[in-house]
Image (cartoon, grey):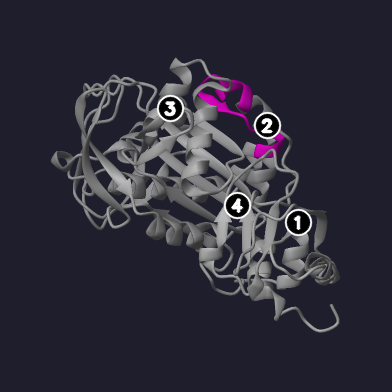
Amino acid sequence: MPQWDGASRINIAFFGLRGDDGQGEGCPTCTDTIMVLTVDPATKTAGMLSIPRDMWVNIPGAGYGRINTAWAIGENAKLPGGGPQLAMQTVSQFIGMPIHYYVQVDFGTFVSFINLIGGIDVYVEERMVLDPLGAGQDHFVLKPGDYRHLTGPRALAYARCRHESQGCSGGDVGRAKRQQQVILAIRDKVLEGETFATLITQAPQLYAEFSSGIHTNMSLEDAIQLAVLAKDIRVDDIKRGVIDNTMAIPADTTINGVPANVLRPVPDLIRILRDEIFVPGGPLSPLAQGDPVALMQSDQAKIRIINNTYTAGLEQRTATLLTAQGMQVVEYGVPTGASNTTKIILYSSKLYALRYLTELLGVGSQQITIQPDPASTVDMEIRLGEDWVGRVPSGY
């Protein structure tokens, strides 16, 4: 994995393995927690998107299955990159965004880190009776309306709880919301007082100490760079979203001959939430911050243009226009067939360039296809249609 340049948007998938949960559910390498963190250095904004474990998706090379089984399939089949690679590919394909890194933290390491920073503080919204893992850990009660300080074992119990019998409402969706709350509480604790400076100074030693319980393809240098950037991101500029039952349909199916309950996604609704989290300014809205031209140019997107019209030379005229705006047209492609509408295919996370082009070319969301492809020689492809012929500005 190439080193992060510190300027481009970065998407990180966080996975929590079920492990031996003591609840008889089996599949210790199923990822019952799936959360994607996106960070944009250009506008100092971030977002979190949680995906339910029972989402019924296409797992590359394995057909349809629950999204939480991708890691286990990759491990069991001994695929290149193993479980992490297949899980990353599955999540990327499902949300239509590239995943650059993954992080998986063992329960013990999570508990140790929370204790290292002195615990976290959370606001409790419902009565909960929790049983932390580990010897000597008694059950404890949380009351609604309280701010409670949680040690490592208690923070883990709070983040894992999903059963109504314990007072944890919302099932997997409620658990995902609490996990995002815990992530923000960790952020607050890490950034307060001298804690941040101490952690950065001790980063190499801590990395070595916790390395057996943290599994990731992110280098220590990139992790430190990301942590430094996090200091400049206000909590109000961190968007949060959970794909819930309003964006998926509960359904019955069979898995290996066994009846199973799954969630079938409603793509259009999930796309709206995804764009609110990942696309600057949200779906089909102006850029939230900064100069649109400067942000577009900061993406340094490489563009291929294909002329799918009967107007000869339209691709060169369009390239001249885009170049004048500061964009990089690096290729002309072979026509894919006459088309009345202009389309954009996005192969990487150059979202500022995409937003600028949609405004410039008058392209709506239905004319955009997000198709992550790390092997692509360009970041996006513009397929010119007849609707663009009469809209080319004079002089081009």
Decide which of tag 3 and tag 4 comes sooner along the chain. Answer: 4
Q: Which mark is residue 62?
A: 3
Give the magenta range.
Answer: 207-223
**Which residue position holds label 2?**
219
Numbered disc 2: secondary structure: loop
Q: Amino acid at mark 2?
A: Ser
Residue 114 in sight here: no
Q: Nearer the viewer, mark 4 or mark 1?
A: 1
**Which residue position holds label 1?**
303
- The spot of residue 185 in percent (x, y) is 44, 49
- The spot of residue 8 in percent (x, y) is 70, 51
How far apart, in angstroms, are the residues tagged by discs 3 and 4? Answer: 30 Å
- The spot of residue 49 in percent (x, y) is 45, 50
Q: Amino acid at mark 3?
A: Ala
Decide which of tag 1 and tag 2 comes sooner along the chain. Answer: 2
**Which residue position holds label 4?**
39
Q: Is residue 13 magenta?
A: no
Decide which of tag 2 and tag 4 comes sooner along the chain. Answer: 4
Q: Nearer the viewer, mark 3 or mark 4?
A: 3
**Residue at 80% from the left image edge and 63% from the top image edge:** 327
Numbered disc 3: secondary structure: loop
Q: Amino acid at mark 4?
A: Val
Image-based side of 55 in relation to 89, left or right: left
Query: Magenta: predominant secondary structure element?
Result: helix
Image-based side of 129 in relation to 27, left or right: left
Crowd around label 1: few <14 · some 14–19 · many ≥20 (10 Å): many
**Label 1–label 2 contact, CB within 8 A:** no
How far apart, in angstroms, are the residues tagged by discs 2 and 3? Answer: 30 Å
**Residue at 71% from the left image edge and 56% from the top image edge:** 335
Q: Amino acid at mark 1?
A: Ile
Q: Nearer the viewer, mark 1 or mark 2?
A: 1
**Residue at 41% from the left image edge and 48% from the top image edge:** 180
